[in-house]
Image (cartoon, helix red, strand yellow):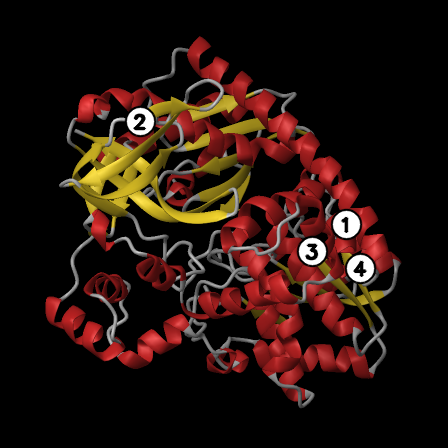
Amino acid sequence: MRWTIKPKPDPDTVARLSNELAVDSTTSFLLAQRGIETFEEAKNFFRPDLNDLHDPFLMKDMKKAVTRIEEAVEHQENILIYGDYDVDGTTSVALLSSYLLSFYPNVATYIPDRYEEGYGISYKGIDFAEDNNFSLIIALDCGIKAIDKVTYASKKGIDFIICDHHRPGAEIPQAKAVLDPKQDDCEYPFKELCGCGVGFKLIQALASKKGETIEDLVLYLDLVVTAIGADIVPIVGENRTLAYHGLKVINKNPRPGFEAILKQVKKEKLTITDVVFIIAPRINAAGRMKHGNHAVTLLCETDINLAAKYAIDIDTYNTDRRDADKQITVEALAQIEKNMEQDRFTSVVYNENWHKGVIGIVASRLIETYYRPTLVFTKSGEMLAASARSVKGFDVYNALEKCSEHIEQFGGHKYAAGLTLKPENYKGFKAQFEKVVEETIDPKLLVPEISIDSQISLLDITPKFYRILSQFAPFGPGNMTPVFMSEDIRDTGYGKQVGEDKTHLRFTATQHGKGNIVGIGFGLGKQIELIENKKLFKAAYTIDENEWNGTVSLQLKIKDIKP
Protein backbone atom coordinates (compact mmCIF):
# COMPACT_ATOMS: atom_id res chain seq x y z
CA MET A 1 0.00 0.00 0.00
CA ARG A 2 1.14 3.53 -0.84
CA TRP A 3 0.33 6.08 1.86
CA THR A 4 -0.08 9.69 0.78
CA ILE A 5 -0.92 12.62 3.02
CA LYS A 6 -3.38 15.14 1.60
CA PRO A 7 -2.14 18.75 1.37
CA LYS A 8 -2.57 20.70 4.59
CA PRO A 9 -4.98 23.63 4.47
CA ASP A 10 -3.97 27.18 5.42
CA PRO A 11 -3.38 27.21 9.22
CA ASP A 12 -4.94 30.68 9.62
CA THR A 13 -8.14 29.44 7.95
CA VAL A 14 -8.16 26.39 10.24
CA ALA A 15 -7.74 28.55 13.36
CA ARG A 16 -10.42 31.04 12.25
CA LEU A 17 -12.91 28.28 11.40
CA SER A 18 -12.26 26.55 14.70
CA ASN A 19 -13.05 29.79 16.52
CA GLU A 20 -16.13 30.73 14.43
CA LEU A 21 -17.68 27.25 14.62
CA ALA A 22 -16.55 26.47 18.19
CA VAL A 23 -15.10 23.12 17.09
CA ASP A 24 -11.76 21.41 17.66
CA SER A 25 -8.86 22.08 15.30
CA THR A 26 -9.05 18.62 13.67
CA THR A 27 -12.66 19.24 12.62
CA SER A 28 -11.85 22.69 11.21
CA PHE A 29 -8.76 21.18 9.51
CA LEU A 30 -10.97 18.58 7.76
CA LEU A 31 -13.47 21.25 6.70
CA ALA A 32 -10.80 23.54 5.26
CA GLN A 33 -9.28 20.56 3.47
CA ARG A 34 -12.64 20.11 1.72
CA GLY A 35 -12.68 23.74 0.58
CA ILE A 36 -15.03 24.92 3.34
CA GLU A 37 -13.56 28.18 4.62
CA THR A 38 -16.42 30.27 6.04
CA PHE A 39 -19.19 29.90 8.58
CA GLU A 40 -21.79 30.07 5.78
CA GLU A 41 -20.06 27.35 3.74
CA ALA A 42 -19.87 25.14 6.83
CA LYS A 43 -23.57 25.71 7.49
CA ASN A 44 -24.43 24.72 3.91
CA PHE A 45 -22.17 21.65 4.21
CA PHE A 46 -23.66 20.35 7.45
CA ARG A 47 -27.26 21.39 6.69
CA PRO A 48 -27.75 21.28 2.90
CA ASP A 49 -30.89 23.17 1.86
CA LEU A 50 -33.05 22.03 -1.06
CA ASN A 51 -33.93 25.67 -1.74
CA ASP A 52 -30.29 26.22 -2.72
CA LEU A 53 -30.55 23.84 -5.70
CA HIS A 54 -29.77 25.53 -9.02
CA ASP A 55 -32.53 26.77 -11.30
CA PRO A 56 -33.19 23.81 -13.67
CA PHE A 57 -33.72 26.25 -16.56
CA LEU A 58 -29.99 27.06 -16.45
CA MET A 59 -29.48 23.69 -18.16
CA LYS A 60 -29.18 23.89 -21.94
CA ASP A 61 -32.42 22.87 -23.72
CA MET A 62 -34.45 22.62 -20.50
CA LYS A 63 -37.03 25.11 -21.77
CA LYS A 64 -37.33 23.11 -25.02
CA ALA A 65 -37.78 19.86 -23.07
CA VAL A 66 -40.52 21.29 -20.85
CA THR A 67 -42.32 22.87 -23.81
CA ARG A 68 -42.30 19.58 -25.76
CA ILE A 69 -43.68 17.62 -22.76
CA GLU A 70 -46.37 20.25 -22.19
CA GLU A 71 -47.36 19.96 -25.87
CA ALA A 72 -47.55 16.17 -25.55
CA VAL A 73 -49.84 16.46 -22.54
CA GLU A 74 -52.01 19.09 -24.22
CA HIS A 75 -52.44 16.97 -27.37
CA GLN A 76 -52.93 13.69 -25.48
CA GLU A 77 -49.82 12.10 -27.01
CA ASN A 78 -48.39 8.83 -25.72
CA ILE A 79 -45.06 9.33 -23.92
CA LEU A 80 -42.50 6.52 -23.56
CA ILE A 81 -39.98 6.81 -20.72
CA TYR A 82 -36.86 4.94 -21.87
CA GLY A 83 -33.89 4.17 -19.60
CA ASP A 84 -30.81 2.05 -19.18
CA TYR A 85 -31.04 -1.24 -17.27
CA ASP A 86 -28.67 -0.30 -14.43
CA VAL A 87 -29.53 1.43 -11.14
CA ASP A 88 -29.17 4.94 -12.52
CA GLY A 89 -31.36 4.09 -15.51
CA THR A 90 -34.12 2.21 -13.69
CA THR A 91 -34.39 4.77 -10.89
CA SER A 92 -34.54 7.53 -13.53
CA VAL A 93 -37.38 5.77 -15.34
CA ALA A 94 -39.24 5.17 -12.06
CA LEU A 95 -38.78 8.84 -11.08
CA LEU A 96 -39.96 10.46 -14.31
CA SER A 97 -42.77 8.00 -15.05
CA SER A 98 -44.12 8.25 -11.47
CA TYR A 99 -44.07 12.03 -11.64
CA LEU A 100 -45.78 12.26 -15.05
CA LEU A 101 -48.37 9.63 -14.13
CA SER A 102 -49.34 11.74 -11.11
CA PHE A 103 -51.11 14.13 -13.51
CA TYR A 104 -51.13 12.49 -16.98
CA PRO A 105 -52.15 8.88 -17.79
CA ASN A 106 -50.65 8.29 -21.27
CA VAL A 107 -47.21 7.30 -20.03
CA ALA A 108 -45.39 3.95 -20.31
CA THR A 109 -41.86 2.74 -19.60
CA TYR A 110 -39.27 0.84 -21.61
CA ILE A 111 -36.02 -0.75 -20.44
CA PRO A 112 -33.94 -2.41 -23.18
CA ASP A 113 -33.04 -6.07 -22.75
CA ARG A 114 -29.39 -6.19 -21.70
CA TYR A 115 -28.72 -9.20 -23.92
CA GLU A 116 -30.95 -8.68 -26.95
CA GLU A 117 -30.57 -4.92 -27.27
CA GLY A 118 -27.51 -3.97 -25.24
CA TYR A 119 -26.78 -0.58 -23.69
CA GLY A 120 -28.57 2.58 -24.69
CA ILE A 121 -31.28 3.42 -27.18
CA SER A 122 -32.11 0.51 -29.49
CA TYR A 123 -33.83 0.22 -32.87
CA LYS A 124 -36.08 -2.39 -31.26
CA GLY A 125 -37.18 0.14 -28.64
CA ILE A 126 -37.97 2.73 -31.33
CA ASP A 127 -39.93 0.12 -33.32
CA PHE A 128 -41.86 -0.69 -30.14
CA ALA A 129 -42.70 3.01 -29.79
CA GLU A 130 -43.90 3.18 -33.40
CA ASP A 131 -45.99 -0.01 -33.11
CA ASN A 132 -47.69 1.33 -29.97
CA ASN A 133 -48.30 4.87 -31.17
CA PHE A 134 -45.77 6.71 -28.98
CA SER A 135 -44.84 10.07 -30.48
CA LEU A 136 -42.40 11.18 -27.76
CA ILE A 137 -39.57 9.19 -26.18
CA ILE A 138 -37.76 10.62 -23.16
CA ALA A 139 -34.43 8.79 -22.79
CA LEU A 140 -32.73 8.77 -19.39
CA ASP A 141 -29.12 7.86 -18.51
CA CYS A 142 -28.42 7.16 -22.19
CA GLY A 143 -28.72 8.67 -25.66
CA ILE A 144 -25.98 11.30 -25.81
CA LYS A 145 -24.25 9.35 -28.61
CA ALA A 146 -27.40 7.92 -30.25
CA ILE A 147 -27.09 10.01 -33.44
CA ASP A 148 -28.39 7.35 -35.85
CA LYS A 149 -31.13 6.09 -33.52
CA VAL A 150 -32.60 9.56 -33.01
CA THR A 151 -32.56 10.14 -36.79
CA TYR A 152 -34.24 6.75 -37.31
CA ALA A 153 -36.98 7.72 -34.84
CA SER A 154 -37.42 11.13 -36.41
CA LYS A 155 -38.14 9.55 -39.80
CA LYS A 156 -40.95 7.62 -38.09
CA GLY A 157 -42.43 10.80 -36.65
CA ILE A 158 -41.15 10.12 -33.12
CA ASP A 159 -39.49 12.93 -31.15
CA PHE A 160 -36.73 12.41 -28.59
CA ILE A 161 -35.81 14.26 -25.41
CA ILE A 162 -32.45 13.04 -24.12
CA CYS A 163 -31.50 13.29 -20.43
CA ASP A 164 -27.95 12.01 -20.04
CA HIS A 165 -24.83 12.67 -18.00
CA HIS A 166 -22.20 10.76 -19.99
CA ARG A 167 -19.53 12.51 -22.02
CA PRO A 168 -20.85 13.70 -25.39
CA GLY A 169 -19.07 12.85 -28.63
CA ALA A 170 -18.15 15.37 -31.33
CA GLU A 171 -21.72 15.29 -32.65
CA ILE A 172 -24.93 15.69 -30.62
CA PRO A 173 -28.14 13.83 -31.60
CA GLN A 174 -30.79 15.91 -33.39
CA ALA A 175 -33.34 15.50 -30.60
CA LYS A 176 -36.03 18.02 -29.61
CA ALA A 177 -33.98 18.67 -26.48
CA VAL A 178 -30.69 17.32 -25.13
CA LEU A 179 -30.18 17.71 -21.38
CA ASP A 180 -26.60 16.87 -20.44
CA PRO A 181 -24.58 19.21 -18.20
CA LYS A 182 -21.36 17.81 -19.69
CA GLN A 183 -22.08 19.45 -23.06
CA ASP A 184 -19.42 22.10 -23.71
CA ASP A 185 -22.01 24.79 -24.36
CA CYS A 186 -24.20 23.93 -21.36
CA GLU A 187 -23.83 26.61 -18.69
CA TYR A 188 -25.45 24.62 -15.90
CA PRO A 189 -23.22 25.28 -12.84
CA PHE A 190 -22.97 21.67 -11.59
CA LYS A 191 -21.55 19.15 -14.05
CA GLU A 192 -21.54 15.96 -11.95
CA LEU A 193 -25.22 14.96 -11.81
CA CYS A 194 -26.04 11.30 -12.42
CA GLY A 195 -28.74 10.33 -14.94
CA CYS A 196 -31.42 10.29 -12.25
CA GLY A 197 -30.16 13.71 -11.12
CA VAL A 198 -30.73 15.09 -14.64
CA GLY A 199 -34.19 13.47 -14.55
CA PHE A 200 -34.85 15.21 -11.23
CA LYS A 201 -33.91 18.58 -12.73
CA LEU A 202 -36.47 17.90 -15.48
CA ILE A 203 -39.28 17.22 -13.00
CA GLN A 204 -38.14 20.24 -10.98
CA ALA A 205 -38.58 22.36 -14.13
CA LEU A 206 -41.96 20.79 -14.95
CA ALA A 207 -43.13 21.27 -11.35
CA SER A 208 -42.16 24.95 -11.30
CA LYS A 209 -44.34 25.56 -14.38
CA LYS A 210 -47.25 23.94 -12.50
CA GLY A 211 -46.75 26.15 -9.45
CA GLU A 212 -45.29 23.34 -7.34
CA THR A 213 -42.32 23.79 -5.00
CA ILE A 214 -39.26 21.68 -4.23
CA GLU A 215 -41.07 20.31 -1.15
CA ASP A 216 -43.58 18.65 -3.49
CA LEU A 217 -40.73 16.64 -5.05
CA VAL A 218 -39.00 15.41 -1.87
CA LEU A 219 -40.73 12.01 -2.11
CA TYR A 220 -38.70 11.23 -5.26
CA LEU A 221 -35.33 11.76 -3.57
CA ASP A 222 -35.05 8.15 -2.32
CA LEU A 223 -34.66 7.23 -6.01
CA VAL A 224 -32.11 10.00 -6.61
CA VAL A 225 -29.86 9.08 -3.66
CA THR A 226 -29.87 5.43 -4.76
CA ALA A 227 -28.64 6.46 -8.21
CA ILE A 228 -26.05 8.86 -6.76
CA GLY A 229 -24.61 6.08 -4.58
CA ALA A 230 -24.70 3.40 -7.26
CA ASP A 231 -23.22 5.52 -10.06
CA ILE A 232 -20.30 6.69 -7.88
CA VAL A 233 -20.64 10.36 -8.79
CA PRO A 234 -18.96 12.99 -6.58
CA ILE A 235 -21.03 13.69 -3.46
CA VAL A 236 -20.40 17.42 -3.54
CA GLY A 237 -22.52 20.42 -4.49
CA GLU A 238 -26.02 19.49 -5.65
CA ASN A 239 -25.30 15.78 -5.31
CA ARG A 240 -24.57 16.24 -1.60
CA THR A 241 -27.83 18.15 -1.12
CA LEU A 242 -29.87 15.57 -3.04
CA ALA A 243 -28.16 12.64 -1.26
CA TYR A 244 -28.52 14.21 2.20
CA HIS A 245 -32.27 14.69 1.80
CA GLY A 246 -32.68 11.43 -0.13
CA LEU A 247 -31.29 9.47 2.82
CA LYS A 248 -33.84 11.17 5.08
CA VAL A 249 -36.63 9.97 2.77
CA ILE A 250 -35.28 6.41 2.60
CA ASN A 251 -35.03 6.28 6.40
CA LYS A 252 -38.31 8.01 7.30
CA ASN A 253 -40.73 7.53 4.43
CA PRO A 254 -39.37 5.16 1.76
CA ARG A 255 -41.45 4.08 -1.22
CA PRO A 256 -42.91 0.55 -0.79
CA GLY A 257 -40.22 -1.02 -2.99
CA PHE A 258 -37.42 0.23 -0.76
CA GLU A 259 -39.41 -0.52 2.39
CA ALA A 260 -39.76 -4.15 1.24
CA ILE A 261 -35.99 -4.45 0.67
CA LEU A 262 -35.24 -2.92 4.08
CA LYS A 263 -37.53 -5.41 5.79
CA GLN A 264 -35.66 -8.26 4.07
CA VAL A 265 -32.26 -7.11 5.29
CA LYS A 266 -33.57 -6.02 8.72
CA LYS A 267 -31.86 -2.62 8.54
CA GLU A 268 -33.30 0.24 10.55
CA LYS A 269 -31.13 3.18 9.50
CA LEU A 270 -29.37 3.37 6.16
CA THR A 271 -26.21 5.29 5.29
CA ILE A 272 -25.03 5.99 1.75
CA THR A 273 -22.74 2.96 2.14
CA ASP A 274 -25.79 0.78 2.82
CA VAL A 275 -27.47 2.22 -0.27
CA VAL A 276 -24.41 1.25 -2.33
CA PHE A 277 -23.97 -2.25 -0.89
CA ILE A 278 -27.52 -3.31 0.05
CA ILE A 279 -30.07 -1.54 -2.14
CA ALA A 280 -28.12 -0.86 -5.35
CA PRO A 281 -26.95 -4.47 -5.97
CA ARG A 282 -30.53 -5.72 -5.66
CA ILE A 283 -31.88 -3.13 -8.09
CA ASN A 284 -28.99 -3.87 -10.45
CA ALA A 285 -29.48 -7.64 -10.20
CA ALA A 286 -32.80 -7.43 -12.06
CA GLY A 287 -31.13 -6.03 -15.19
CA ARG A 288 -28.09 -8.27 -14.81
CA MET A 289 -29.83 -11.61 -14.31
CA LYS A 290 -33.38 -11.15 -15.67
CA HIS A 291 -34.69 -7.82 -16.97
CA GLY A 292 -34.54 -4.21 -15.78
CA ASN A 293 -38.34 -4.03 -15.98
CA HIS A 294 -38.50 -5.99 -12.71
CA ALA A 295 -36.60 -3.17 -10.96
CA VAL A 296 -38.89 -0.48 -12.39
CA THR A 297 -41.97 -2.47 -11.35
CA LEU A 298 -40.65 -2.75 -7.77
CA LEU A 299 -39.71 0.94 -7.59
CA CYS A 300 -43.06 2.15 -8.95
CA GLU A 301 -45.28 -0.19 -6.88
CA THR A 302 -47.52 1.61 -4.38
CA ASP A 303 -48.90 -1.49 -2.61
CA ILE A 304 -46.57 -2.77 0.13
CA ASN A 305 -47.79 -6.38 -0.18
CA LEU A 306 -47.09 -6.51 -3.91
CA ALA A 307 -43.77 -4.72 -3.33
CA ALA A 308 -42.81 -7.43 -0.80
CA LYS A 309 -43.52 -10.09 -3.44
CA TYR A 310 -41.43 -8.30 -6.07
CA ALA A 311 -38.62 -7.79 -3.53
CA ILE A 312 -38.43 -11.57 -2.99
CA ASP A 313 -37.92 -12.03 -6.75
CA ILE A 314 -35.26 -9.32 -6.81
CA ASP A 315 -33.46 -10.94 -3.87
CA THR A 316 -33.36 -14.24 -5.80
CA TYR A 317 -31.78 -12.48 -8.79
CA ASN A 318 -29.22 -10.94 -6.43
CA THR A 319 -28.29 -14.35 -5.01
CA ASP A 320 -27.87 -15.68 -8.56
CA ARG A 321 -25.73 -12.64 -9.39
CA ARG A 322 -23.46 -13.23 -6.38
CA ASP A 323 -22.95 -16.89 -7.30
CA ALA A 324 -22.13 -16.00 -10.91
CA ASP A 325 -19.65 -13.25 -10.10
CA LYS A 326 -17.79 -15.44 -7.58
CA GLN A 327 -17.42 -18.29 -10.08
CA ILE A 328 -16.36 -16.04 -12.98
CA THR A 329 -13.82 -14.23 -10.79
CA VAL A 330 -12.18 -17.57 -9.95
CA GLU A 331 -12.06 -18.48 -13.66
CA ALA A 332 -10.70 -15.06 -14.68
CA LEU A 333 -7.90 -15.20 -12.09
CA ALA A 334 -7.01 -18.69 -13.32
CA GLN A 335 -6.88 -17.39 -16.91
CA ILE A 336 -4.43 -14.62 -15.92
CA GLU A 337 -2.18 -17.20 -14.24
CA LYS A 338 -2.45 -19.70 -17.10
CA ASN A 339 -1.43 -17.01 -19.61
CA MET A 340 1.35 -15.85 -17.23
CA GLU A 341 0.02 -12.29 -17.29
CA GLN A 342 0.48 -11.50 -13.61
CA ASP A 343 3.08 -8.79 -14.29
CA ARG A 344 1.36 -6.89 -17.10
CA PHE A 345 0.13 -3.29 -16.95
CA THR A 346 -3.44 -4.42 -17.69
CA SER A 347 -5.79 -7.34 -17.13
CA VAL A 348 -7.78 -8.29 -20.25
CA VAL A 349 -9.63 -11.62 -20.03
CA TYR A 350 -12.29 -13.34 -22.14
CA ASN A 351 -14.60 -16.33 -22.03
CA GLU A 352 -17.59 -16.66 -24.33
CA ASN A 353 -19.67 -18.33 -21.59
CA TRP A 354 -19.29 -15.66 -18.92
CA HIS A 355 -22.54 -13.98 -17.89
CA LYS A 356 -22.66 -10.53 -19.48
CA GLY A 357 -24.61 -9.17 -16.52
CA VAL A 358 -21.76 -9.54 -14.02
CA ILE A 359 -18.58 -8.81 -16.01
CA GLY A 360 -18.39 -5.28 -14.57
CA ILE A 361 -18.44 -6.64 -11.04
CA VAL A 362 -15.80 -9.22 -11.99
CA ALA A 363 -13.57 -6.46 -13.40
CA SER A 364 -13.75 -4.68 -10.03
CA ARG A 365 -12.98 -7.94 -8.21
CA LEU A 366 -9.91 -8.58 -10.38
CA ILE A 367 -8.54 -5.15 -9.45
CA GLU A 368 -8.56 -6.28 -5.81
CA THR A 369 -5.93 -8.90 -6.79
CA TYR A 370 -4.16 -7.19 -9.72
CA TYR A 371 -4.35 -3.45 -9.19
CA ARG A 372 -4.39 -2.16 -12.77
CA PRO A 373 -6.83 -1.15 -15.57
CA THR A 374 -9.01 -4.17 -16.28
CA LEU A 375 -11.37 -5.39 -19.00
CA VAL A 376 -13.56 -8.49 -18.84
CA PHE A 377 -14.97 -9.72 -22.18
CA THR A 378 -17.75 -12.14 -23.04
CA LYS A 379 -19.70 -13.11 -26.17
CA SER A 380 -22.69 -10.94 -27.05
CA GLY A 381 -24.42 -12.08 -30.22
CA GLU A 382 -21.88 -11.88 -33.03
CA MET A 383 -19.71 -9.44 -31.07
CA LEU A 384 -17.59 -9.42 -27.93
CA ALA A 385 -18.73 -7.11 -25.14
CA ALA A 386 -16.58 -5.86 -22.26
CA SER A 387 -16.78 -3.90 -19.07
CA ALA A 388 -13.75 -1.77 -18.23
CA ARG A 389 -12.71 -0.63 -14.77
CA SER A 390 -9.75 1.54 -13.86
CA VAL A 391 -7.54 2.39 -10.92
CA LYS A 392 -7.52 5.74 -9.13
CA GLY A 393 -5.90 8.46 -11.22
CA PHE A 394 -5.98 6.69 -14.61
CA ASP A 395 -8.55 7.63 -17.28
CA VAL A 396 -9.61 4.36 -18.93
CA TYR A 397 -12.01 6.21 -21.27
CA ASN A 398 -9.08 8.12 -22.82
CA ALA A 399 -7.08 4.88 -23.10
CA LEU A 400 -9.95 3.20 -24.96
CA GLU A 401 -10.17 6.18 -27.34
CA LYS A 402 -6.57 5.45 -28.33
CA CYS A 403 -7.61 1.87 -29.21
CA SER A 404 -10.67 2.94 -31.21
CA GLU A 405 -9.45 1.33 -34.46
CA HIS A 406 -10.21 -2.07 -32.88
CA ILE A 407 -13.53 -1.06 -31.24
CA GLU A 408 -17.03 -0.95 -32.74
CA GLN A 409 -18.51 1.27 -30.02
CA PHE A 410 -17.77 2.38 -26.47
CA GLY A 411 -18.92 4.82 -23.83
CA GLY A 412 -18.61 5.60 -20.16
CA HIS A 413 -16.55 7.57 -17.68
CA LYS A 414 -12.98 8.04 -16.46
CA TYR A 415 -13.09 4.96 -14.23
CA ALA A 416 -15.73 2.72 -15.86
CA ALA A 417 -16.68 2.05 -19.47
CA GLY A 418 -18.32 -0.49 -21.73
CA LEU A 419 -17.38 -1.49 -25.25
CA THR A 420 -18.05 -3.93 -28.07
CA LEU A 421 -15.71 -5.24 -30.74
CA LYS A 422 -15.55 -7.93 -33.41
CA PRO A 423 -14.05 -11.28 -32.25
CA GLU A 424 -11.25 -11.03 -34.82
CA ASN A 425 -10.14 -7.70 -33.27
CA TYR A 426 -9.79 -9.04 -29.71
CA LYS A 427 -6.08 -9.93 -29.86
CA GLY A 428 -5.17 -6.67 -31.58
CA PHE A 429 -7.16 -4.67 -29.06
CA LYS A 430 -5.63 -6.52 -26.10
CA ALA A 431 -2.10 -5.79 -27.35
CA GLN A 432 -2.90 -2.15 -28.15
CA PHE A 433 -4.59 -1.53 -24.78
CA GLU A 434 -1.57 -2.97 -22.94
CA LYS A 435 0.75 -0.76 -25.01
CA VAL A 436 -1.31 2.41 -24.42
CA VAL A 437 -1.49 1.84 -20.66
CA GLU A 438 2.21 0.95 -20.39
CA GLU A 439 3.15 4.16 -22.21
CA THR A 440 0.78 6.51 -20.38
CA ILE A 441 0.25 5.31 -16.81
CA ASP A 442 2.34 6.67 -13.96
CA PRO A 443 3.83 3.48 -12.39
CA LYS A 444 2.92 4.65 -8.88
CA LEU A 445 -0.78 4.44 -9.86
CA LEU A 446 -0.34 0.65 -10.03
CA VAL A 447 0.13 0.55 -6.25
CA PRO A 448 -3.11 0.99 -4.23
CA GLU A 449 -3.16 4.33 -2.45
CA ILE A 450 -4.38 5.19 1.02
CA SER A 451 -5.03 8.91 1.05
CA ILE A 452 -4.67 10.22 4.61
CA ASP A 453 -6.53 13.34 5.72
CA SER A 454 -4.72 14.03 8.96
CA GLN A 455 -2.38 12.67 11.61
CA ILE A 456 -4.03 12.61 15.04
CA SER A 457 -3.48 11.28 18.54
CA LEU A 458 -5.60 8.40 19.80
CA LEU A 459 -6.65 10.72 22.64
CA ASP A 460 -8.36 12.96 20.04
CA ILE A 461 -10.86 10.17 19.37
CA THR A 462 -13.77 10.98 21.65
CA PRO A 463 -17.54 10.41 21.36
CA LYS A 464 -18.00 14.16 20.73
CA PHE A 465 -15.40 14.13 17.94
CA TYR A 466 -17.09 11.11 16.35
CA ARG A 467 -20.52 12.78 16.54
CA ILE A 468 -19.21 15.77 14.60
CA LEU A 469 -17.37 13.49 12.16
CA SER A 470 -20.61 11.61 11.47
CA GLN A 471 -22.17 14.88 10.29
CA PHE A 472 -19.66 15.01 7.42
CA ALA A 473 -21.81 12.27 5.84
CA PRO A 474 -23.01 11.37 3.27
CA PHE A 475 -19.57 10.22 2.20
CA GLY A 476 -18.41 9.41 -1.30
CA PRO A 477 -16.11 10.70 -4.05
CA GLY A 478 -15.17 14.31 -3.28
CA ASN A 479 -16.01 13.81 0.41
CA MET A 480 -14.61 10.45 1.40
CA THR A 481 -14.78 9.14 4.96
CA PRO A 482 -11.82 10.83 6.70
CA VAL A 483 -8.76 8.59 7.00
CA PHE A 484 -6.42 9.23 9.91
CA MET A 485 -2.91 8.15 10.77
CA SER A 486 -1.44 7.67 14.22
CA GLU A 487 2.18 6.82 15.02
CA ASP A 488 3.92 5.22 18.01
CA ILE A 489 1.04 2.82 18.67
CA ARG A 490 1.40 -0.43 20.59
CA ASP A 491 -0.93 -3.35 21.03
CA THR A 492 -1.71 -3.93 24.71
CA GLY A 493 -0.70 -7.56 24.25
CA TYR A 494 -3.97 -9.19 23.32
CA GLY A 495 -3.82 -8.71 19.54
CA LYS A 496 -4.81 -11.78 17.53
CA GLN A 497 -5.92 -13.08 14.17
CA VAL A 498 -9.69 -13.51 14.00
CA GLY A 499 -12.25 -14.94 11.60
CA GLU A 500 -12.80 -18.53 10.50
CA ASP A 501 -9.58 -18.63 8.49
CA LYS A 502 -7.68 -16.10 10.63
CA THR A 503 -7.67 -13.52 7.82
CA HIS A 504 -8.55 -10.53 10.01
CA LEU A 505 -6.62 -8.73 12.74
CA ARG A 506 -7.98 -7.46 16.06
CA PHE A 507 -6.02 -5.61 18.72
CA THR A 508 -6.32 -2.94 21.41
CA ALA A 509 -4.23 0.11 20.59
CA THR A 510 -2.57 2.40 23.07
CA GLN A 511 -0.31 5.41 22.48
CA HIS A 512 2.32 6.53 24.98
CA GLY A 513 0.57 4.32 27.53
CA LYS A 514 -2.77 6.13 27.15
CA GLY A 515 -6.08 5.83 25.29
CA ASN A 516 -7.01 2.18 24.79
CA ILE A 517 -9.16 1.67 21.68
CA VAL A 518 -9.95 -1.49 19.70
CA GLY A 519 -8.69 -1.78 16.12
CA ILE A 520 -10.07 -4.23 13.56
CA GLY A 521 -8.29 -4.82 10.25
CA PHE A 522 -10.24 -6.87 7.72
CA GLY A 523 -7.93 -8.96 5.55
CA LEU A 524 -4.89 -7.88 7.58
CA GLY A 525 -4.40 -11.09 9.58
CA LYS A 526 -0.94 -11.65 8.08
CA GLN A 527 0.27 -8.35 9.54
CA ILE A 528 0.10 -9.68 13.09
CA GLU A 529 3.89 -9.91 13.19
CA LEU A 530 4.05 -6.09 12.97
CA ILE A 531 2.21 -5.69 16.28
CA GLU A 532 3.48 -8.71 18.26
CA ASN A 533 5.55 -8.30 21.42
CA LYS A 534 4.28 -4.75 21.90
CA LYS A 535 6.27 -3.43 18.93
CA LEU A 536 5.72 0.20 17.97
CA PHE A 537 3.80 0.66 14.71
CA LYS A 538 1.77 3.23 12.82
CA ALA A 539 -1.71 2.72 11.44
CA ALA A 540 -3.98 4.28 8.82
CA TYR A 541 -7.65 3.96 9.77
CA THR A 542 -11.17 5.33 9.79
CA ILE A 543 -13.23 5.70 12.96
CA ASP A 544 -16.37 3.66 13.38
CA GLU A 545 -18.93 2.62 15.98
CA ASN A 546 -19.12 -0.97 17.14
CA GLU A 547 -22.20 -2.36 18.85
CA TRP A 548 -21.78 -5.51 20.92
CA ASN A 549 -24.29 -6.91 23.42
CA GLY A 550 -26.11 -3.59 23.53
CA THR A 551 -22.95 -1.59 24.25
CA VAL A 552 -21.78 0.96 21.68
CA SER A 553 -18.09 1.89 21.56
CA LEU A 554 -15.73 3.54 19.11
CA GLN A 555 -13.23 1.46 17.17
CA LEU A 556 -10.56 1.92 14.52
CA LYS A 557 -11.22 0.31 11.14
CA ILE A 558 -7.64 -0.35 10.15
CA LYS A 559 -6.76 0.14 6.47
CA ASP A 560 -3.04 -0.64 6.78
CA ILE A 561 -0.21 -0.99 9.30
CA LYS A 562 3.46 -0.10 8.91
CA PRO A 563 6.40 -0.55 11.31
How far is mark 1 from mark 4, CA to CA? 12 Å
Secondary structure beneath dot 1 equals helix
Secondary structure beneath dot 3 equals helix
Establish if 512 lies above or below 94. Answer: above
How far is mark 2 from mark 4, CA to CA? 50 Å
Which residue is label 2 attached to? 495
Identify the mark at residue 426; answer none if there is no mark: none
On-image quarter of the C terminus: top left
Residue found 46% across the figure and 17% down from its top: 501
| Mark in the foreground, 2 or 3 | 2
Residue 159 at least partly seen: no
- Which comes sooner in the sequence, label 4 or label 3? 3
Frontmost residue, 466 versus 363: 466
Q: Residue 450: x and y, percent? A: 28, 41
- Which comes sooner in the sequence, label 1 or label 4? 1
- Which comes sooner in the sequence, label 2 or label 3? 3
Identify the mark at residue 293; answer none if there is no mark: 1
Q: Residue furthest right?
A: 132
| Mark in the foreground, 2 or 4 | 2
| Mark in the foreground, 1 or 4 | 4
Q: Amino acid at mark 3?
A: Phe
Q: Residue 556: x and y, percent? A: 33, 42
Which residue is label 4 attached to? 301
- Which comes sooner in the sequence, label 2 or label 1? 1
Secondary structure beneath dot 4 equals loop
Establish if 33 lies above or below 282. Answer: below
Q: Amino acid at mark 2?
A: Gly
Residue found 38% across the figure and 61% down from its top: 467
| Mark in the foreground, 4 or 3 | 3
Residue found 26% across the figure and 61% down from its top: 30
